[in-house]
Amino acid sequence: MKNPVKSYIPSMKNIDSHSHVRGESVYVDDIPELRGTLHAAIFCSPIAHGKIKSIDYSEALTMPGVQHILTHQDIPGENQIGGIVPDEPLFAEKELHFQGQPIAMILADTELQAREALHKIKIECKEKEAIVDPIEAHAKGLLHIPSRTFNLGETSNVWQKCEHIVTGEADTDGQEHLYLETQGAYAYPVENGHIYLASSTQGPTAVQKMAAKVLGIPMHKIEVDVRRLGGGFGGKEDQATAWAVMAALGAKLSKRPVKLILHRMDDMKMTGKRNPYRSTFKIGLSKDLKILAFEADYYQNAGAAADLSPAIMERTLFHGNNSYFIPNVKVTAHSCITNIPPNTAFRGFGGPQGMFVIEAAIAKAARTLGIKKRVIQKNNLLQEGHEFPYGQIAEDCQAHATWNSLEEKHHIEKIQLDIDDFNANNKHFKKGLAIMPICFGISFTNTPMNHARALVHIYQDGSIGVSTAAVEMGQGVNTKMVQVAAKTLSVNAHRIKIESTNTTRVANTSPSAASSTADLNGKAVQIACNALLQRLKKVAADNLDTKVESIKIHEETVFVNDIETKLTWEELIQKAFLARVCLTENGHYATPKIHFDKAIEKGHPFAYHVYGTAAFEVTLDCIRGRYDFDSVKVVHDFGTSMNRIIDLGQMEGGIVQGIGWMTMEELIYNDKGRLLSNALSTYKIPDIYSVPKEIDVTFLNTDGNDMAIFKSKAVGEPPLLYGIGAYFAILDAVQNFNPNFEPKIYHAPFTPEKVLMALYKA
Ligand code: LUZ
Ligand code: MOS
């Protein structure tokens, strides 16, 4: 045997880890600056709602280093960047709709000069009343799109058959993405009016398309390039676009390179976040604790422009029943216009907001009945063959399997007994327990978006370059792409380089989002590599004087009828090149089977679902209102994980991010629509001291699912959903101290301040 070649390593380290640790990974702000680069600073609306009466730029224009101030009047194309609804100007004209809305861009020789000049712009506004509450907006008819309803069965016929009926309210606040790398772009003019545009975006095509529209030039004149992002979490699915387009506009008009990097406080002030929701619910149960009917109205706080909120609202409807089978469902969602920055995609994309409501409804029902929440949860889990309210039938359903496996492996009943014992023996500390099952649909809910391409070059020396639509944002997708190419071609992973994501190599792409990036792009890589392999087998067969069917390429060696030959990968590539065989292939993948009919709100929108169940254990300090998570134990359906290290990282990160949303991350606006928690000193995200002491993840054993790449199920968003369990564990602990406490509104985050009030509420 020659040196063993490991072409497929299910525990392969993230290929970025070396350059990350050494600080050598390149982000937009690290790109070497060209001579003459101008630096941008954005002037934005000081008010949440109103009109511009007058603006005076004259003094700012005289400031040292200032070269240009660009406004809507300088736009050669359309002043419009709305993705789903054309309702979002790049620069405000007269009307102002949120604090932080961009009005103008200053270009100066240095960043400091540009920022200094901001203070010299004089603006006078006529202020109108700001609306920040979605229910108030709904009452005034302020909606981005008509409301939508998903129906299963007929709830109105069932209420009289219910033994128990409970109604209530459940609200979730927003969440700041807090990607470590803030929004930014670097643009420079190339010859003949072409623009090169480096952007920290999840959606290179969205950036290219909007830049073309605003600049009034065809898409082929703009090359968008993305090396990697320092985090996205949905915040750069749509909202990287504005800054990239501004940089491109600046480059076109000034004929100089333009760099625009948002400072953290500007990023927090100007960009949208997870949509806050307010919701009402009604749930009905039979005597034997089957949920017979569920109704909800979801009031989405979309902010001042539609952005992705219509799609997010749709996913709320898709996930209204979480992983429960409910025969009669009627859920309605409203996308409400308010005077805060346009809210946007955030890991889970409306799903978590919907799932919190059904969990609150079950919690309230359990409380009313004097039983544990998990009794109702377990009694209503989805099973194979059950119908979702949108018509898809549950297949490869792991709701019971993950629940039962968690219960058995971790002895949940024993944990409960220990908690009861602890609580009986401690006056000032109380423990709480919550079980959180999840179910998440994989695919863009908008069927036409489910496709991707991969361009694979094999070079003469046997090394390989792969370009895809996938954007690396820390989630490890490039490592998975290496694995797909290495396994399919059976070559060493070191031969493969993943190129930047670039619109001239892979065009018309969907954003890296919806947890679907590895599936869509991985399948495209697989298709391209299989086509190349077929060609190479033909070359080998010709050279070894045998049939193509007899050839196998295994770990960089050619085999004939399973017998090893002397022909190696490198020699084979040489022979193919000399025989003038094409060593490049473009693979295209479009998810089969999926469809959805919005007219009847039924179809088969998801390639598959991901399931799992988590147990949260918390200890509450009942004097201070503080809490610590003792453990989060999870049994999760990864299918057959193609990379356990990366998948585990996604799991841990998602759980902690979900806990942050449910517990400590608090966006506070004043009554004028100004964000007060606009820095890391006032907006708290989980740190090393507040993460659970233990996160124990069990990989459920399944056959996997062929719709997933290598049967390895999507893992980006589902883990965040577990975080909802944190709220209900804390609530359990609070009620173990103060049995009278019942939330009037189930309202996350459950901050220590709110916990303290709850503990001593009469
Ligand atoms: N983006 C999108 C998403 O455009 N459609 C989706 O269904 C979706 N789901 C999750 C995250 N981003
Ligand atoms: Mo996303 S919320 O960009 O998958």
Image (spheres, grey):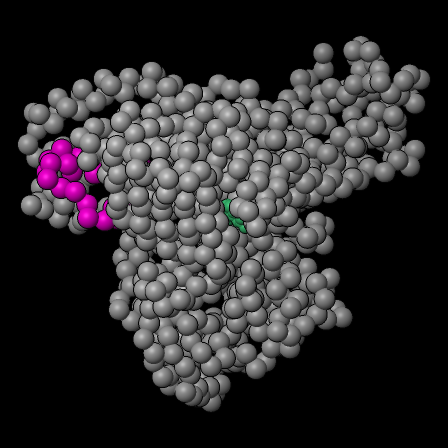
Residue 152 percent across, percent down from the top left:
46, 39
Left or right of 266 in this view: 28: right
Q: Is-magenta flag for residue 732?
A: yes
**Is residue 641 placed above or below 758 in the rendered structure?**
above
**What residue is shown at x 56% (from left), y 67% (from top)?**
86
Left or right of 250 in this view: 458: right
- The quadrant of the image that shows the C terminus is top left
Residue 80 percent across, percent down from the top left:
57, 70
**What residue is shown at x 17% (from left), y 50% (from top)?**
753
Residue toward you, 713 or 111 = 713
**What residue is shown at x 34% (from left), y 16% (from top)?**
409
Whether residue 651 appears in this view of the structure is: no
Give the quadrant of residue 564: top right
**Is residue 663 placed above or below 440 in the rendered structure?**
below
**What residue is shown at x 79% (from left), y 22% (from top)?**
568
Residue toward you, 415 or 404 = 404
Residues drawn in magenta: 724-749
Residue 477 percent across, percent down from the top left:
57, 39
Residue toward you, 433 or 281 = 281
Whether residue 50 appears in this view of the structure is: yes
Give the quadrant of residue 32: bottom right
Residue 62 percent across, percent down from the top left:
48, 87
Give the quadrant of residue 336: bottom left
Q: Is-magenta flag for residue 260?
A: no
